[in-house]
Image (cartoon, rainbow, N blue to C red):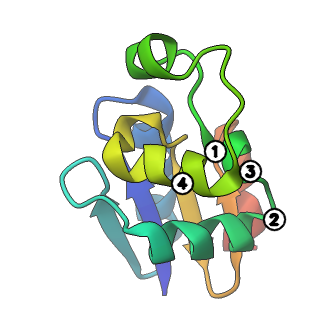
Amino acid sequence: MITIYHNNRCSKSRSALTELENSGKAFEVVYYLESPPNKGELKEIIRKLGIKPSDLIRKGEKVFVEHYKGKTLTDEEWIEAMVKYPILIERPIVIAGDHAVIARPTEKIQEILG
C-alpha cells in the first residue's frame, strides 16, 4: 500500500496526489495537518526517508522563523517540534513499504511508483 502525507493547500502535494491517482495504484491519503503523526510514526518516516529529522523541517514556515531559526536542536527536539507544529513537516511524503520520498520535485514519486 502506498501512503501520501498530504496538504491540500500545497501545489506540490496536489501534484503528487494527481500522480498517484493517475497511476492506478491503491493508496491512502493522510491529511497530516488534521491527523499529525506521533513521535514513533515520525521516527519511522524519517528512517524510511534516510534523512535527519532537521532535513524534514520546512524552514520557510512562520512557526520555524518565530520559534526555531538560528537554534541548534537535537534530533529528538526536532521530532518534538514537528509533533507540536505539523506545519513544519516537509511535504508531500510518499511511502511504499520500507521506502519513502519527499516528492519535491513531483517526479521523485516515480521512485515509489516504479
- Mark 4 secondary-structure assignment: helix
Rendered residue at 28%/39% (across/down): 8
Which one is in front, 94 or 60?
60
Task: Give the mark toward the camera: 4 or 3.
Answer: 4
Per the image, the residue denoted by label 4 is 79
**Amino acid type at mark 4:** Ile
Across and down, in percent, residue 16 comes to: 51, 48
Q: In terms of sequence position, does the residue under pointer 2 or pointer 1 come before the other?
A: 2
**Amino acid type at mark 2:** Gly
- Residue 108: assigned label: 3
Rendered residue at 74%/50% (across/down): 108
**Amino acid type at mark 1:** Leu
State the CA–CA distance, disc 3 to disc 1.
Answer: 16 Å
Task: Give the mark toward the camera: 3 or 1.
Answer: 1
Location of residue 26 (image quadrant) = bottom left
- Mark 2 secondary-structure assignment: loop
Residue 14 shown left or right of residue 58 in the figure: left
Question: Is there CB contact under 8 Å for labels 2 and 1?
Answer: no
Per the image, the residue denoted by label 2 is 50
- Residue 56: assigned label: 1
Rendered residue at 71%/73% (across/down): 48
Across and down, in percent, residue 82 comes to: 45, 47
State the CA–CA distance, disc 4 to disc 3.
Answer: 24 Å
Rendered residue at 41%/62% (across/down): 21
The answer to whether residue 43 is above or below residue 33 is: below
**Amino acid type at mark 3:** Lys
Task: Give the mark toward the camera: 1 or 4.
Answer: 4
Residue 95 shown left or right of residue 63 in the figure: right
